[in-house]
């Protein structure tokens, strides 16, 4: 019983935090490669998707299921293709928004993902909403608090808690608008909003797909293949000069290899598994933790200063995530007491043989 509890509660939380850590590393590597050697995001996306598709193809061959799965009919196939279209559109909007605005603006808007996902999940009746229920109140309060914590980190600096030994901060460099004017700032913000709405809707579609076809590796392979089939021709149209596809620096090679073989593949399969196991809101609520992880990693590995605003915001986000998780656990207890029908998550092991 305890082992089942660990699998259902501890492992998903640990996996989601690990994914956010991996995403932060991928972002840092891409930013370093693009700032130093001008790595195009169209090229970066195409390389990562092709490498990710190869990883999932290999995993599909290694982990073959003994149980019979339902056939890949058109309703399922079309939804998997829709996942790829939503994913690629969201990623392109994100990078274009950063180009027109700034990474800071993208991060702030990205932390609206839990709210977007919660609203969509409630609309599609994937998330139970009963305003008098303590579980629903906890999820709503936690979602709002997670957004508030992220806003605190960006809007309130405060005094230094830990001083930096160096004068230049990487976060300052990454927060600068990449050659954008004030008029483009609004367009960048709109593109980021569209991007994270697409990602939130993608979580909803993903939950439907996993109920129809409970196999993470096959779904991730189909999703990745769709994104590859879109990203390569679009990338060639956007970057027709083949010199743009050459990885000239070692940091560009590391960024592509890490993001494609590890970061992208790991996050895709864990997100898919998390959506099936615990529902779309569970996956989305961990999005603001990336800011906390970025602050901690910058302080430890880059020697950046830590300010009071970062500490306060991190505490708020951590408390908010725990509040939502408590609400989800309370809801599962209530559902278990009544019936197992209508659960917001889908339960099956990650790599069932």
Image (cartoon, rainbow, N blue to C red):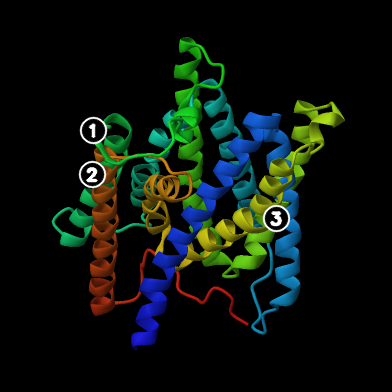
Label for residue 52? 3
Image spot of residue 86 (x, y percent):
58, 42
122 vs 210, left or right, is: left
- Does residue 246 appear left or right of residue 115 in this picture? right
Q: Circle 2 sits on which residue?
A: 312
Disc sitting over residue 158 in the figure: 1
Mark 3 → mark 2, Cα distance in angstroms: 37 Å
Q: Residue at x 51, y 59 (%)?
A: 271
Q: Nearer the viewer, mark 3 or mark 2?
A: 2
Contact? badges 2 and 1 (CB < 8 Å) = yes
Q: Residue at x 57, y 24 (%)?
A: 99
Q: Position of residue 294 (x, y in %)?
A: 43, 46
Q: Which of these two is toward me, 175 or 106? A: 175
The image quarter in which residue 6 lies: bottom left
Q: Earlier in the sequence, mark 2 or mark 1?
A: 1
The mark closer to the camera, 2 or 1, is 1
On screen, residue 294 above or below 135: above
Q: CA distance from mark 2 to mark 1?
A: 10 Å
Q: Quadrant of residue 87?
A: top right
Specify which label sits upstream in the sequence, 3 or 1: 3
Q: Position of residue 92 (x, y in %)?
A: 61, 34
Q: Earlier in the sequence, mark 3 or mark 2?
A: 3
């Amino acid at each position: 019983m305890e082992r089942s509890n660990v699998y259902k509660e501890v492992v998903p939380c640990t996996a989601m935090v690990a994914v956010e850590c991996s995403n932060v590393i991928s972002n840092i590597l891409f930013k370093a490669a693009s700032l130093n050697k001008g790595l195009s995001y169209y090229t970066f996306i195409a390389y990562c998707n092709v490498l990710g598709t190869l990883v999932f193809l290999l995993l599909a061959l290694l982990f073959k299921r003994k149980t019979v799965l339902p056939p890949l009919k058109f309703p399922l196939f079309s939804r998997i293709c829709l996942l790829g279209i939503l994913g690629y559109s969201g990623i392109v909007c994100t990078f274009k928004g950063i180009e027109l605005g700034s990474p800071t603006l993208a991060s702030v808007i990205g932390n609206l993902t839990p709210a977007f996902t919660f609203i969509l999940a409630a609309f599609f009746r994937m998330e139970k909403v009963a305003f008098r229920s303590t579980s629903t109140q906890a999820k709503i309060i936690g979602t709002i608090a997670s957004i508030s914590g992220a806003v605190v980190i960006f809007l309130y600096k405060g005094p230094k808690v830990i001083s930096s030994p160096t004068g230049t901060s990487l976060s300052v460099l990454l927060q600068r608008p990449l050659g954008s004017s004030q008029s483009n700032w609004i367009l960048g913000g709109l593109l980021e909003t569209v991007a994270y709405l697409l990602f939130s809707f993608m979580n909803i579609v993903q939950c439907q797909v996993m109920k129809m076809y409970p196999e993470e590796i096959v779904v991730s392979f189909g999703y990745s293949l769709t994104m590859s089939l879109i990203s390569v021709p679009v990338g060639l149209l956007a970057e027709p000069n083949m010199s743009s596809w050459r990885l000239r620096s070692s940091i560009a090679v590391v960024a592509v290899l890490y993001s494609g073989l590890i970061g992208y593949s790991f996050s895709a399969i864990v997100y898919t598994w998390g959506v099936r196991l615990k529902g779309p809101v569970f996956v989305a609520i961990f999005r603001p933790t990336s800011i906390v992880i970025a602050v901690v990693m910058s302080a430890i590995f880059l020697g950046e200063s830590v300010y009071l605003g970062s500490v306060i915001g991190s505490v708020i986000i951590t408390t908010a995530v725990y509040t939502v998780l408590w609400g989800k656990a309370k809801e599962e207890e209530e559902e278990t007491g009544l019936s197992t029908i209508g659960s917001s998550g889908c339960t099956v092991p990650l790599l069932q043989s």
